[in-house]
Amino acid sequence: MRASIMNTMTKSQALFEKALQYIPGGVNSPVRAFRAVGGQPFFVHRAAGARVWDVDGRELIDYVGTWGPAILGHAHPKVIQAVQEAAVFGTSFGIPNPLEVELAELICREIPSVEKVRMCSSGTEATMSAIRLARGYTGRDAIIKFDGCYHGHADALLVKAGSGALTFGNPDSAGVPASFSQHTMVLPYNDADAVEQALRIHAGKIAAVILEPVAGNAGLFPPRPGFLERLRKATEEAGTVLIFDEVMTGFRLGWQGAQGLYGIRPDLSCFGKIIGAGLPVGAFGGRADIMDKLAPLGPVYQAGTLSGNPLAMAAGLAALRELRSSDAYRRLEALGAQLEQGMSELGRKAGIPVTFQRVGSMFCGYFTDQPVWNLADAMLSDRARFGRFFHAMLSRGVYLAPSQFEAGFISLAHTPEDIEATLRAAAESVKLL
Ligand code: KE4
């Protein structure tokens, strides 16, 4: 019996069944489990350019791009070559190495707000460390984050909103003690009034405000005109550290990320994803007077065995050099505009409420007829319809993010023909919704 079932199972199904025996939920990161869209995840065999191939040989146009790092496309030859060349000299040293200085110099030279930077191994480490640093620098405990923004899974950030600017948050995960979340206030994204009020009510107590300058973890919603400027002004007046979490937007929305796009100078910035070209990396940096509070110079402790790992540094440098040398952002903008126009038109033709939101090469299509400016707006979208759309597209060879509350990513390996093929698949898929 078992053998015959095994014979009818796809390789992905068999792998998932096996994975479930050894890995909680069968995945090493929850979103990969397809719980938000139903069904089971496929397992990837390889990726190249704008495509991934699953273990059953299916070819898919990929708009997840390993959640942002693959801006050049997967397995870019220059990245692969850089990793191979670095690897023969050793995969990790735990000793200062020239590559980490080179990447630090590049980031400090190219991002005006970053005077000094510290490498780590994930976006979570970067934001967790930036918050500890802001607390150490200001001597204050409280922080403000925004509903719908995700900054990794550090305890202080797994917090859901209390009721407005008067109260602090509650744990948004089991295992986070209430005492850990009582220093975190969660406010609605794009609500500058609430931030200004909170900074007034809690004057002298707020160490930092942290946000995604373009929110890419509840789908995609941009800052309203003036929101970032008011945050910058209010935090400056309050002596509160403004932290831009650019783990996703850094080097994605332009060479200088969202801070360059919107002309805002944060006090600290967090990076990840693209700066490691898919290898484990994170970084946080900003004003030298704040950064110099970090050990071994200052009293704020932060460390990491693999921080500045030579393979991640080599990959990131190769990717950033490639990005810098091409007219990358013009090309990404053109592809994004083509997708946006096609998807928006599709909704109108099919008589289906679609709000397609995009900044550069990051996008999200919501099944709602209202613009999405915050999490509450995003929650109004029809997630069941998104799940059906996701699977209809997957069966037509297009891999979108397996959740309504994730952003999609276009790479330099995508072509106008890929976008046209995607729009054709979408035109067929919407008929099934
Ligand atoms: P990591 O610890 O996953 O490297 O980075 C956390 C993080 C921090 N800040 C922002 C803005 C992020 O988008 C992320 C991680 N992004 C998710 C995608 N929504 C990673 C995918 C996953 O969790 O599996």
Image: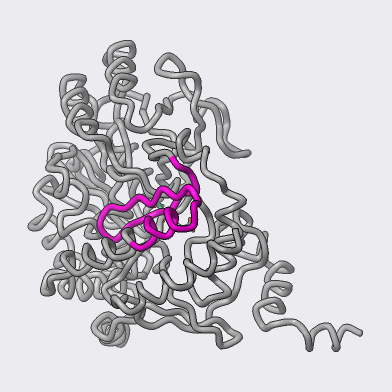
Residue at the location (55% across, 61% down)? 389
Tell whether 287 sits left or right of 276: left
Residue 149: image location, x then y, percent? 40, 41
Dividing the picture into quadrants, the one containing residue 287 is: top left
Tell whether 276 sits left or right of 35: left
**Can you see residue 312?**
yes
Q: Is 370 located above or below residue 232 in the figure? A: below
Residue 222: image location, x then y, percent? 30, 43
Residue nearest the observer in this picture, 282 or 319:
319
Residue nearest the observer in this picture, 258 or 182:
258
Residue at the location (32% across, 57% down)? 362
Residue 188: image location, x then y, percent? 40, 29
**Can you see residue 97?**
no
Residue nearest the observer in this picture, 117 or 189:
189
Which quadrant holds the N terminus? bottom right
Which quadrant holds the C terminus? bottom right
Residues shaded magenta? 342-369
Q: Is 413 located above or below residue 108 in the figure? A: below
Q: Is residue 191 magenta?
A: no
Q: Is residue 349 magenta?
A: yes
Residue 34: image location, x then y, percent? 60, 61
Residue at the location (27% across, 80% down)? 79
Tell whether 66 sits left or right of 230: right
Dividing the picture into quadrants, the one containing residue 274 is: bottom left
Q: Is 149 located above or below residue 144 in the figure? A: below
Tell whether 199 sits left or right of 7: left
Q: Quadrant of ligand 1?
A: bottom left
